[in-house]
Image (cartoon, rainbow, N blue to C red):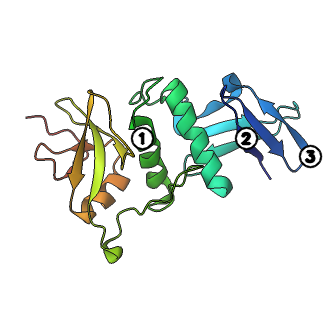
Amino acid sequence: MSVRPVTLNADGSIDVVYDERGHSGTVAAADVVWGTSSGGSADHNYIMLECPDGCGGASAWPVAGGAAAPIAQQMFLEKVQREGCPCGTVEAGRSDALPEGHVRLNCNRMDGPGRWQPAGAELLREVDPQAGKTSFQVIYQDTAEQMITGLEPSGGVGPDHKLAVLHDPTEYDVLMRTDPAYLSQDKAHILATPEVA
C-alpha cells in the first residue's frame, strides 16, 4: 500500500490517504519533496509523500504516475510549475507550456509513449507509426547547445525556448534513451552531446 494523493489543493498541499494504516490528512506544500538520487541530489523523477499522521509511512511516486497516473502526473506538473524542476531546466513560476512538456518528457522516458494522462487532460496519442503519427514536437533551449527540455507541449513556450518538429520516429526512440538530449543544428536529429556550430 502507499501514501497516495487524493486531492491537489490550490496552495500546493496535498490531501493523502495511507490505506494500510487507515490514516488520512493533508501534506503541506513544503513537505511534498523531490526524491533523492543515488548521488544525493534531488531527483525530478520521484516525489516523496509522507503520511501526515506521523506514523513513518511514506511513498515514492514516479513521474509516470504509478498506480494513480492522472493525479500523480498532475502532482508533478503543479510542483514543477510552482517551484521549478531540480534539474534546472524549468524555473519556478513558469506559466507557459514548458513545465508540462518537461514533465511529459520525463514521464515518457520512464514508462514509454501513451502514458501521459495528467488529471483533467485528454489522453493524447504519442508517436505511433502504425496509427499514422510519425512526427513529434520537442521543446529546446534557444542557446547554441539546443538542449531538449520538453516534449509535445500543449501551448506556446517563452522566448528562451523554441519548438522543433521531428519527422523520423526513430529519433523519438533516441530521445527516450538519451538524457540529457540535444537537438542537432539542422533540427532533424537527437544527440547525446551538443553539436555547437
Q: Is residue 133 above or below residue 94?
A: below
**Label 1, label 2: how far apart the Cα atoms are:** 23 Å
Q: Is residue 136 above or below residue 57?
A: below
Using the image as rendered, state which of residue 13 and residue 185 is in the foreground.
13
Q: State the quadrant of the C terminus.
A: top left
Using the image as rendered, state which of residue 151 and residue 196 is in the foreground.
151
Q: Secondary structure at mark 3?
A: loop
Q: Is residue 163 visible?
A: yes
Q: Secondary structure at mark 1?
A: helix
Discs 1/2, front: 2
Q: Tell me whether the residue at label 1 lies in contact with that at label 3, contact meaning CB atoms closer than 8 angstroms.
A: no
The type of residue carrying mark 1 is His
User: What percent of the width, then of the height, locates residue 129?
Assistant: 31, 72
Q: Which residue is mark 2?
A: 7
Label whose residue precedes the other's in the sequence (3 or 2): 2
Q: Tell me whether the residue at label 3 lies in contact with that at label 2, contact meaning CB atoms closer than 8 angstroms.
A: no
Q: Residue at x 30, y 58 (%)?
A: 172
* Left or right of 187 on screen, residue 92: right
Q: Is residue 46 visible?
A: no
**Label 3, label 2: how far apart the Cα atoms are:** 17 Å
Residue 102: assigned label? 1
Residue 22: assigned label? 3
Please identify the quarter of the rendering in which residue 143 is found.
top left
* Left or right of 178 on screen, residue 54: right
Q: Residues within 10 Å of mark 3 (few under 14, many from 20)?
A: few
The type of residue carrying mark 2 is Thr
**Label 1, label 3: how far apart the Cα atoms are:** 35 Å
Q: Residue at x 16, y 45 (%)?
A: 184
